[in-house]
Amino acid sequence: MNRILYRLGNGAAAHPWRTISAWVVVVVVALGLAGSFGGTTHDDYDIPDARAQVGIEQLRAHLPAHGGATAQVVVHDPSGDALVATDLRALVERLHGLDHASHVTEPRLSADGDTALVTVSYDVPVTDPDLVGKSGYDPLVGAIEPLRDAGLQAELGGELPGGAESEMAGTGELAGVVAALLLLVVAFGSVVAAGLPLAIALTGLAAGSAGITLLAATMDVSTAAPTVATMVGLGVGIDYALLLVTRHVEFLGQGLDKREASGRALATAGRSVVFASATVLISLLGLRLGGLPVYSTFGYATAIAVVSVMAAAITLVPALCGLAGHRLLRRRTRKGRTRAQKTPLTARWAARVAHRPVAAALAALTFLLLLAAPTLGMRTWPQDGSSNSTETSVRRAYDLIDAEYGAGANGPFTIVVDTSRVDADAVADRLADDRGIAAVTTPVTSPDRAISVFDAEPTTGPADERTSDLVERLRDDLPAGVEVTGTTPLFADISGMLSSRLWLVVGFVVAVSVLLLAMMFRSVVVPVKAAVMNLLSIGASYGVLTAVFQWGWGGSVLGIDHAVAVSSWIPILNFAILFGLSMDYEVFLLSRIREDWLRTGDARGSVERGLASTGRVISSAAAIMVVVFLGFSTEADTVVKQLGFGMAVAIVLDATVVRMVLVPATMTLLGTWNWWLPAWLDRLLPTIESERHGDGGSGDIWDDFDKTDDRTPAGV
């Protein structure tokens, strides 16, 4: 791999316009193919392993009008006067006229008569193209607009409006890009050098986005998958390019010409980039074990983005660096003005940590464990109207229904009864007497008389822990042939299923990543230690998420006006992404430490020098990734907000507490044991070399390459 990457970097720098032209062609062709043959994103909410799916399939087979999407319309008179019946009848007629509206209930009046609740059922699922986004939402708005014009409060809640109001605004992405550019300027002190990583990441993302669109033509790709792919792709793309540009500038500063600097940068840092992207891809593969089709599409889409930005980094960085030449250097360096060399802050810090490794390690470990402690009380729930901002109609509808009808009216259960086995009226009477049920509707029998269906309204809201317990208890108590289904029971199934499968995903990702690290670093200790530290930082981020969202500590800063459960989608998704991203920094740091250790044999000194040489670039890369993720945490959708915030917290902890304290402290304590590998395992493991030294001395990595090029500087 060293030889291939060296020649790739050298050749791209020698012929930059060929490389740039090739990428222009690739992006144009990819976008053209995506425009001609690409598909559109489409959610698939069918969960084969969920108990609620059984009832949903029964409804689709025998009562199609009740097996699709639903929406709630709430009308309220702010003055407290009773609503006019003619206004409500006109509303029902308008709702009946909506496309795919198969059933509209009669208005359900509140006890004081100033509020009415109408439920609309559709004959297609909420993921149908005719209902997705504004297609289904705007007609609903049009139906309630006359009531708003008359001075009444009319709000939309439930499944269909909830999905439409959760669409990304895109402001988070823009904010992340602008903030990343500013940080890059500060890090490099050169506008040219700062623009390179961002331009390369965006180029890779353009090709990756086209790939995701083409993927959507062959399978269902979640509507949220491109958002996650963009978030991760932008972060790692800038990181990879930043690492390569930094190493290139380092070689330029040693007096090498731009071709040789590019070749060496790619042969060293480029190898770390390739391996780091491989660890991210392995982590994303773990999403398939989550049991949800939507997770698989997250993994595929994000993998396409990561591969695209990695390919852009290892080809465009040497090409653009070749074009920029010495303009990448700081102005004072180009003009020959140099300052007295000072010991880097990270080197001084590493020396202090190495001086008291036990105290530093215990302090860092205690801090991370304290942050992770709230995770023990984490409760997950997919999402409902109560977690939305009060600026959304869905949240206002939820609050109105809660106040006028009770929290359970926001998430009624659908009870499906097999009439050949059970009497539906008897089941309805039994549920009406249940302490957890507030009300039941009259059973409706399908035309083929195979099933009967009615709603049971719980006394608690959808996200309430008691509601999930109620679903489980009813399924245990009710006779065979009765299914408890609907959105709330399905969400309860999803939450339980994801919680139980989290450890399966963790086990797979950790095991494969440890194996790859052992192959690269020829060590047993380093991979296991890296995995444990990554788990600590991720666990700490879970704890912070729980404290901020579930406990409500500081949630107002993120636009959360009350405590909400952590989204069920977050633990597995965050873990799979964060474990791969954390391994990026582990690979970057350990590669330089091992490079120095192979050259000097000084176990303790190599830790200090490795941290000194990578501290600035890792800190800069982490800061950029943090601002990108925090940009997404400004979005209105609570799931995206939690995803962005949780990943930002984890990266901050990983780049500071873990990389700056735990890693140097533990590696100092372990000394040469860091690189212990049993002989029998050494023979079994394939070899993937990490970065090696390149100082021009005996045994130099560059001795492996052809030195016939007369442009290679003397003495190298």
Image (cartoon, rainbow, N blue to C red):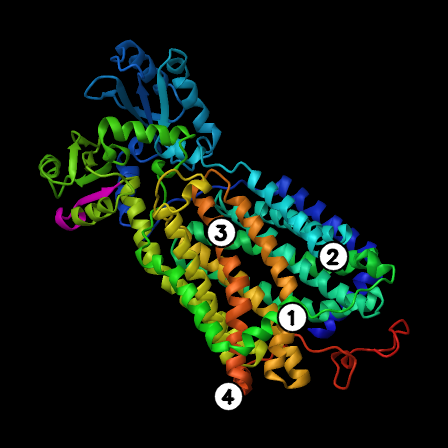
Give the mark toward the camera: 3 or 2.
2
The residue wearing badge 2 is: 316
Disc 4 on helix, strand or loop?
loop
The numbered mark at residue 612 is: 1
Asked whether residue 477 is drawn in magenta, I would say: yes
* x 66%, y 74%: residue: 691
Q: How far apart are marks 3 and 4 (CA)?
A: 38 Å
The residue wearing badge 3 is: 298
- Assess whether mark 4 and mark 3 are in contact (beta carbons under 8 angstroms): no
Tell me if mark 3 has few (under 14), some (14-19) or many (20+) residues whose alpha carbon lies within 10 angstroms of its own.
many
Q: Distance between the residues labelled 4 and 1?
A: 30 Å
Q: What residue type is labelled 3?
A: Phe
Instruction: Name the quarter where the C terminus is drawn.
Output: bottom right
Q: How far apart are marks 3 and 1 (CA)?
A: 36 Å
Which of these two is toward me, 479 or 666?
666
- Assess whether mark 1 and mark 4 are in contact (beta carbons under 8 angstroms): no
Q: What residue type is labelled 4?
A: Pro
In primary-sequence order, the first of circles 1 and 2 is 2
- The quadrant where residue 65 appears: top left
The residue wearing badge 4 is: 678
Give the mark toward the camera: 1 or 2.
1
Instruction: Name the quarter where the N terminus is drawn.
Output: bottom right
The numbered mark at residue 248 is: none
In the displayed structure, does residue 107 sit left or right of residue 10? left
Give the mark toward the camera: 3 or 4.
4
- Which range of residues does the magenta coloring cover? 475-485
